Amino acid sequence: MAGMFETGAAGGGGSNKAFKSQLNKVYAWYTGGFAAFVIVLAVLEQMGLPREWIGFIFLLATIGLYAGIGIMSRTTDAAEYYVAGRRVPAIYNGMATGADWMSAASFIGMAGTLYLQGYSGLAFIMGWTGGYCLVALFLAPYLRKFGQFTIPDFLGERYGGNAARFVGILIAILVSFVYVVAQIYGVGLITARLTGVAFELGVFLGLGGILVCSFLGGMRAVTWTQVAQYIVLIVAYMIPVVWLSVKQTSNPVPQVAYGYQLEKVTAKEKVLMADPKEVEVREVFKARAAALGEKLKDPAAALAADKAAAEKKIADLKAANAPAADVAAAEKALAALPKDPEAAKKAWTAAKAAAEAKARPLNGMAPHAQAFSGDPNGDEKAQAAYDNSRRNFLALIFCLMVGTAALPHILMRYYTVPSVKEARQSVTWSLFFIFLLYFTAPALAVLVKYEVFHVLVGTPFDQLPAWVASWNKVDPSLMSVTDINKDGLLQLNEMTIGGDIIVLATPEIGGLPYVISGLVAAGGLAAALSTADGLLLTIANALSHDLYYKMIDPNASTARRVTISKVLLLVVALMAAYVASLKVADILFLVSAAFSLAAAGFFPALVLGIFWKRATGPGAVLGMIAGVSVTFYYMATTQPWMRGLFGVTGPVADYTWWGIAPISAGVFGVPIGMAVIILVSLVTPAPSKKIQELVEHVRYPNLKMS
């Protein structure tokens, strides 16, 4: 395998076919070896190998494999480190892009979002897939013709100065850092489930696997690792979905079974909405929400009353010589009370919102096949809800499409291919490899929902499958059950299930051997690691190549530049791991925020820079700043976690524009950025003749430059 990487580094155009043939052999052996590894583990499980060992073996084997590729691909050559020597064949670049793209959000979060949101979750699939059409039409081939190493590098060359480059560096770091925090969060979640270690420790264990690939060999190591990771993640994703499809419908094609099962899920939803036991549970939550609402009218008095009642209960228990366990439980309840009225207000507000959600039918979920919430033919409130839901659906698709076409770690991949033609082919292959997972995610969501509705709901609490307790141990906010109406049976509204565990728990939900759970976790780990590799490399390269080499020390040696990149990569990775360990927000918000910021910051400057030769440096700089600023401001004033971070206390409604959700803030930033670039460009001196001719030449290669 090491020889393969050397061939790739040294071979010329004549050796490309031989290089590709060698790649085919290496990855065929790799795929066969991985399949044999899973089969051996399955046999060992049947022979009594403990689950904990299976988890550790999967974790160590896959991270060790990726580390091995990283070590064999180590390099200090600048072209190899930054763009893999520009010799990656289109099909392999497509596979690497697929792995780079299918992050923890795609692998873990998407099916979970579809499970919880139903139809409206399709916005993610439509937006993310549609974005590659924009990449193919407007960006990939033209960026490859310009021939730079990074997106800030392109901005600096196209807009003739360091101002555009510097703003591009800041945006690339902001976007990539937000995105990489989500990936490392996913790594921590998976590692904790695989090995049983604490989430925070899992974050830093997974970080080792991320670093060893990107640290040693840069883009070359990341590329060949991502190809290996794609094979793992797509196999891991497909096996349990096909199994569930066969189990429920005897049809091995889940995409075909999807429609039949959706009809059954819809029918079951109607039954659950009217079920007396479900109604009983919803009434309990409704009463809780009302009680919390009363407490919130005067938090100080309510907290004092709660403390007095808790203290009296402890005194009564002690006076009656109650069992020590009862006294300890009462003391624990007293200690768990909020410390002051402000903390009480915060805790009770969150609890009231959660109770109100669980007081709604179907555990607060919309009917799976319902296009939008509300009713276009209903009363004024229902019509408003419908319009708002549809508006957010379209806004999210727009932000995800445009954000996809502007993500720096994805666009960097098209600098690694040998030619413009292969850049176009790469996008096609990327779409194909991504399609395999995205076309399956909706089916997975429905098959899991069928299993939960028909098998889990109605099960006695003492007969619940082991995976419920296992996931509750990892994180109670992701999986918890409570017998609210004390009937001993699980109702849908008595269960809390987070979208982030739907895919990871699918093998256990379907009754598959634990080795398949390990395989799926390894697939999720591969997805998170592959994207994190690309993102960390983007940040490190922006700092070492664009900031240090291009702006601070143009005479720096190649070895010095690569060394600085590696040091910065380590620092950024540790910072991101620390932020991820704080569990600041869910994976999907962090990822969607990155898309909106990338869309507003980069898309107008990139597209106008390619297709409008009159676009100027001052216009690009001000446009990028305006787009990102508006997007960030909207998120900071409307997203709960960010509002708390920045001390925004006014009603959310006062800051919301047309009811748009914070993750779709880019819908405001993109047009503002585009308008600012155009207006400022028209009132500032035109770019130099050389730059205008370069733009013309990139768009029309046969045009002669003077």
Image (cartoon, grey):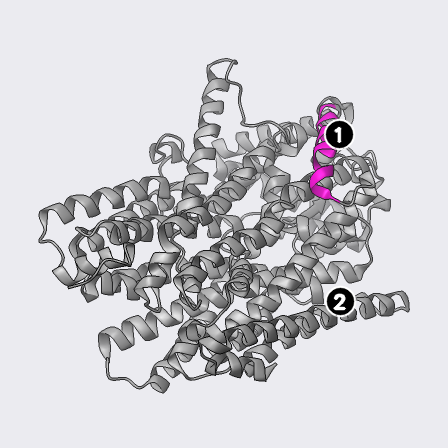
Mark 1 against mark 2, which lies toward the viewer?
A: 2
How many numbered circles are shown?
Answer: 2
Asked if 448 appears above or below 362 in the picture, the reply is below
Asked if 54 appears above or below 288 in the picture, the reply is below
Q: Of the residues shown, which amino acid type is indicated by label 1?
A: Lys
Q: Is 257 contained in the magenta span?
A: yes
Dots 1 and 2: beta carbons under 8 Å?
no
**Toward the viewer: 47 or 495?**
47
| Left or right for 44, reference 585 | right
Locate residue 79, reporting x and y percent: 39, 77
Q: Secondary structure at mark 1?
A: helix
Please report the bounds of the magenta region as a residue range: 253-270
Locate residue 141, reporting x and y percent: 38, 57
Locate residue 454, reporting x and y percent: 80, 35
**Toward the viewer: 137 or 183?**
137
Q: Residue at x 56, y 67 (%)?
A: 226
Asked if 705 appears above or below 540 in the picture, the reply is above
Q: Judge the density around disc 1: few (<14), some (14-19), many (≥20) Cα neighbours within 10 Å.
A: some
The kind of secondary structure the magenta stretch mainly shows is helix
Question: Which residue, given by chain and number where applicable, does mark 1 sit on?
Answer: 264
| Left or right for 40, reference 364 | right
Residue 56 in view in this figure:
yes
Locate residue 671, reporting x and y percent: 29, 40
Question: Which residue, given by chain and number where applicable, does mark 2 sit on?
Answer: 35
Q: Residue at x 58, y 28 (%)?
A: 290
Asked if 310 appears above or below 188 in the picture, the reply is above
Image quadrant of residue 33? bottom right
